[in-house]
């Protein structure tokens, strides 16, 4: 469905220097730096997949989305989505995609949400009957009944984002690009958005590509993650593998009766230790959890034990460090 | 021929939306009256002092000035659409790209609607009252029905030409990213050559020659002089043909330029 091969994109950025003298110099001669935003990016996505596209700020996530939605033309490489090259067949191609840029708005600020929707209906030339059906479905699942008639400027960010998502799905596109759809939302709205993405993916087989910094989004939605950093592809695979490969550490928190016995168990590192509580990080490739607990109970009088997997956030931090991005 | 539906839809929405700003329109009417009176008085003084015969009669000139004030939204290049500037400078234009429509045409419709809605709210009160003023300030009716019809055609075509010119302001913002700079350059030059500062008939003849080569006078000066009968009907028809030609040229050039900047553009931020 989506095939991206060897995409490169560089930006020429004029160097901005501070200070009066430098500023005057810049009037006559601009120095430029070349930023490699994307380096030989390649992946392919099958219909019906939800793919999480992750990476630190400035990694090139949005640039990739922009290339895939036909906004940016890459320097080299090919991209074929449903048989179209996005930046070449723009008008024909964009009928098939829905895009949400979390940091931007496609709704008209001063008019009721419904007016914006009506305009989109005409822009996409959606038939009356289909429009009504889709709108009804979207209104129900995103709970828009009460806000459809309010001007966008009166909506909260969470309400607005739900409307933005609805707006990008009015023409029932088979592909949906979400660029940080949960940015700035509170927990309730985030969950609503996630649930909705899951629903349309299941029921309408919409292929979803989403970028986010919220790892709970990824955990809740994506079976597959693509990690990029500094413009290069670093990892492409499912979340469990990522955990297995980079998240082999578990954290054990033990509470015990006051004791000063030093804890030295091979394969673990002590994250913190007091008289009554220790937190250990266990490398499960070296030692199993049960061994560690056994050793602990031999030396200490245990009160409580809890084991947690390393949160995906930590895995990412570790990954970013490992790849130096 | 591609469907016109999206463009008509955006025109309609914009028009309805723009008509809501009644307070702004009321203030606009008051301002335009103020300026109208000042201009009329300036030219009255000017005509009273002058010995020679002027190329345009005072009566025609007063009508010309009131038309200028009523249709300000049709003729002023600085009349801007901040939303489009924001789209360009903030990067929200990304969304416009993801629509299956021609963006030039889409923006053209938006700009047209904005000027239409603004003028519709303002022109009628000004025209109505200007026709009831005492003799010296009064706006006269066009000499014949034919003249009036020609004026309507010329005014609408003038508006279309103006919007085509103003598209270049927005195109230039893609390169400069500075709306104010582009506006100033286009505003000052365009309005001078459109006869907004000094009516064109009062300009020296060498300057008139330059003015007539450019399209700006077709937006304001030409339709207003058709109205007062200063341009005879025969010449008016000729002028309308020239308007049409300019419109075609400007739109064609605009689309080429637009596609050029679009290719180069880097969507700002995020």
Image (cartoon, rainbow, N blue to C red):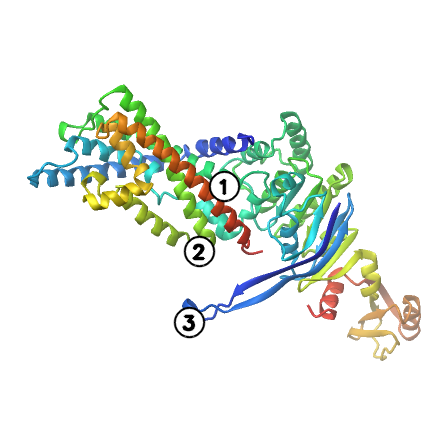
Task: Give how far apart the Cα atoms at labels 3 and 2 are.
Answer: 18 Å
Q: Are marks 2 and 1 on the same chain?
A: yes
Work out whether A125 lies above or below B186: above
* Circle 2 residue: B176
Say if B136 sits above or below A190 in the image. Answer: above
In this image, B89 relative to A286: left or right? left
Mark 1 and mark 3: Cα distance apart in space: 36 Å
**Residue B248, percent from left and from top:** 42, 37
Q: Residues within 10 Å of mark 3 (few under 14, many from 20)?
A: few
User: In the drawing, does residue A183 fall left or right of residue B162?
Assistant: right
Mark 3 secondary-structure assignment: helix
- The residue marked by circle 1 belongs to what chain? B
Q: Residue at x 28, y 23 (%)?
A: B148
Specify which label sits upstream in the sequence, 2 or 1.
1
User: Residue B104 has which mark?
Assistant: 1
* Residue B119 visible in the shown view: no
The residue at which mark 3 appears reads as A25
């Amino acid at each position: 469905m989506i095939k991206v091969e060897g995409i490169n994109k560089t930006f020429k950025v004029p160097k901005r220097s501070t200070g009066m003298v430098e500023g005057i110099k810049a009037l006559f001669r601009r120095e430029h730096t070349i930023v490699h935003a994307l380096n030989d990016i390649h992946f392919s996505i099958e219909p019906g997949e939800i793919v999480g596209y992750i990476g630190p700020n400035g990694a090139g996530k949005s640039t990739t989305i922009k290339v895939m939605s036909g906004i940016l033309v890459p320097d080299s490489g090919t991209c074929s989505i449903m048989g179209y090259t996005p930046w070449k067949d723009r008008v024909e191609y964009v009928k098939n995609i829905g895009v949400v840029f979390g940091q931007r708005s496609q709704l008209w600020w001063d008019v009721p949400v419904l007016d914006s929707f009506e305009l989109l209906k005409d822009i996409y030339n959606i038939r009356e009957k289909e429009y009504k059906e889709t709108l009804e479905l979207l209104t129900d699942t995103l709970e828009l009944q009460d806000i459809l008639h309010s001007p966008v400027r009166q909506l909260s960010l969470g309400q607005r984002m739900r409307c933005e998502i609805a707006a990008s799905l009015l023409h029932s596109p088979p592909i949906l690009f979400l660029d940080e759809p949960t940015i700035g939302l509170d927990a309730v709205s985030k969950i609503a958005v996630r649930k909705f993405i899951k629903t349309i993916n299941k029921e309408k087989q919409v292929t979803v590509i989403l970028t986010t910094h919220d790892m709970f989004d990824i955990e809740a939605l994506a079976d597959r993650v693509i990690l990029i950093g500094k413009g290069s592809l670093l990892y492409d695979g499912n979340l469990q593998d990522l955990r297995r490969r980079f998240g082999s550490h578990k954290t054990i928190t033990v509470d015990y009766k006051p004791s000063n016995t030093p804890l030295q168990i091979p394969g673990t590192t002590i994250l913190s230790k007091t008289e009554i509580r220790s937190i250990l990080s266990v490398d499960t490739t070296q030692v199993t959890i049960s061994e560690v607990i056994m050793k602990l109970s031999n030396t200490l009088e245990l009160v409580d034990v809890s084991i947690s997997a390393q949160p995906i956030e930590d895995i990412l931090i570790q990954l970013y460090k490992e790849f130096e991005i | 021929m591609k469907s016109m539906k999206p463009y008509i839809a955006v025109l309609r929405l914009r028009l309805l939306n723009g008509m809501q700003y009644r307070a702004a329109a009321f203030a606009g009417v008051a301002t335009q009256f103020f300026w109208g009176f000042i201009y009329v008085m300036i030219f009255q003084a000017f005509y009273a002092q002058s010995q020679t015969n002027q190329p345009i009669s005072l009566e025609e000139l007063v009508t010309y000035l009131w038309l200028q004030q009523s249709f300000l939204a049709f003729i002023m290049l600085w009349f801007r659409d901040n939303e489009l500037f924001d789209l360009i400078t903030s990067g929200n234009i990304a969304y416009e790209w993801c629509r299956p429509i021609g963006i030039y045409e889409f923006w053209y419709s938006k700009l047209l609607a904005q000027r239409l809605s603004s003028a519709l709210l303002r022109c009628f009160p000004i025209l109505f009252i200007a026709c009831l003023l005492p003799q010296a300030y009064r706006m006269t009716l066009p000499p014949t029905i034919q003249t009036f019809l020609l004026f309507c055609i010329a005014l609408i075509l003038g508006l279309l030409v103006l919007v085509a010119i103003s598209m270049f302001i927005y195109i230039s913002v893609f390169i400069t990213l500075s709306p104010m700079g582009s506006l100033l350059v286009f505003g000052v030059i365009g309005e001078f050559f459109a006869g907004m500062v000094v009516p064109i008939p009062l300009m020296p003849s060498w300057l008139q020659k330059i003015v007539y080569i450019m399209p700006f006078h077709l937006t304001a000066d030409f339709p207003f002089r058709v109205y007062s009968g200063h341009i005879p009907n025969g010449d008016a028809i000729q002028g309308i043909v020239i308007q049409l030609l300019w419109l075609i040229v400007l739109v064609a050039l605009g689309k080429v330029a637009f596609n050029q900047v679009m290719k180069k553009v880097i969507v700002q931020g995020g």
